[in-house]
Image (spheres, helix red, strand yellow):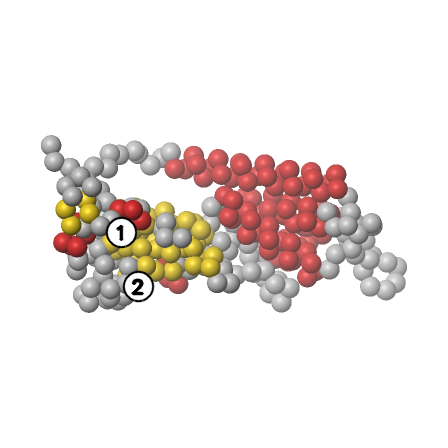
Amino acid sequence: MTLTQLLEELRANLLRDSSTLKSGPPDQFWSDDTLVRYINEAHHKFARRTLCIKDSTTPEVVEVVLVEKQRIYTLHPSILYVTSARHEDGRADMMRSSHSIIWALANPFTDSVDWSSSTIGAIPLRFTTDEGLQVDDEHQIRFAVDPEPDDKQKGKRIYLRTSRLPLEPFSVSKMNVAAEIPEDWQLDMLEWAAWRALRNWDLDAEDRRKADQHKTRFNEAVLECRHEVEIRKMHAPPNWSFGQNGWTYVR
């Protein structure tokens, strides 16, 4: 649905804010700017709570370009979660690791020097996203790789599979922009925008009971969508993972 359709649904069917005077301007409680702001928040909140927007194809979002001697990269601000990562020359996905392993000074089982130092110059095999958030105007995931890229890895790309936020915010100046969350959930998303509008303290507009009903339905839809996303994961067969993240397994 486009923003034009979403706004019409919200105003006419959820808020019943479509009456007009016999003369003069429309008699409406909420301006388009206000409702579009609420729809924007609903769009982002549904995407964040459900991780329902999957992206592995948008270059500016899912491609990490390696830099010589740089391990940590700040990802696109829309990314909420990295499902997997694959080096352009890799035969398989990189292994998800953790800060404590990638930055370990010694192997606790052998008390040897940092095992990753022996693979410097090789294709990065491991990654972690637990390096914290880069906080400026936005929250951005920091993505670390191991081994450290050398001059031969400069310019190579790592391709991500991600869950993300919508890329383009809604605006009254771009009414043809379409929602990015799955179509099945777009009407339910508007329940949050309706709650925002109805909790307004304007005596003519405020209706706390109706507002709470809209919020309840939004939360129910979030749980339903999350359940659907989890069901999809069940189709991936479980497997053992010996010898990953830099460790070896010897019988």
Residue 142: x %, y % from top left: 38, 56
What is the residue that sits farthest to the right in this orientation? 22
Q: Is residue 5 visible?
A: no
Residue 109 found in image quarter:
top left
Seen at 45% across and 39% down, the residue is: 229
Q: Residues within 10 Å of mark 1 (few under 14, many from 20)?
A: few
Which residue is at a point 31% across and 49% down the rendered structure image? 99
In this rendering, which labeled residue sits more in front, label 2 or label 1?
1
Residue under the point 82% across and 49% down: 203
Report which quarter residue 144 is drawn in: bottom left
> Relative to the observer, which residue lies in front, 163 or 127?
127
Give SS at disc 1.
loop
* Label number found at residue 65: 2
At which x and y percent is residue 149? Answer: 22, 61
Q: CA distance from mark 2 to mark 1?
A: 21 Å
- Residue sitting farthest toward the left: 251
Of residues 98 and 23, the one drawn nearer to the viewer in this rendering: 98
Image position, residue 195 (x, y; %): 68, 46
How many numbered marks does the figure carry? 2
User: Which residue is under mark 1?
Assistant: 103
Estimate how packed mark 2 is, as few (under 14), some (14 to 19) or many (20 or more) residues with alpha carbons within 10 Å: some
Q: Residue at x 69, y 38 (%)?
A: 213
The kind of residue tagged 2 is Val
Camera sees residue 170: yes
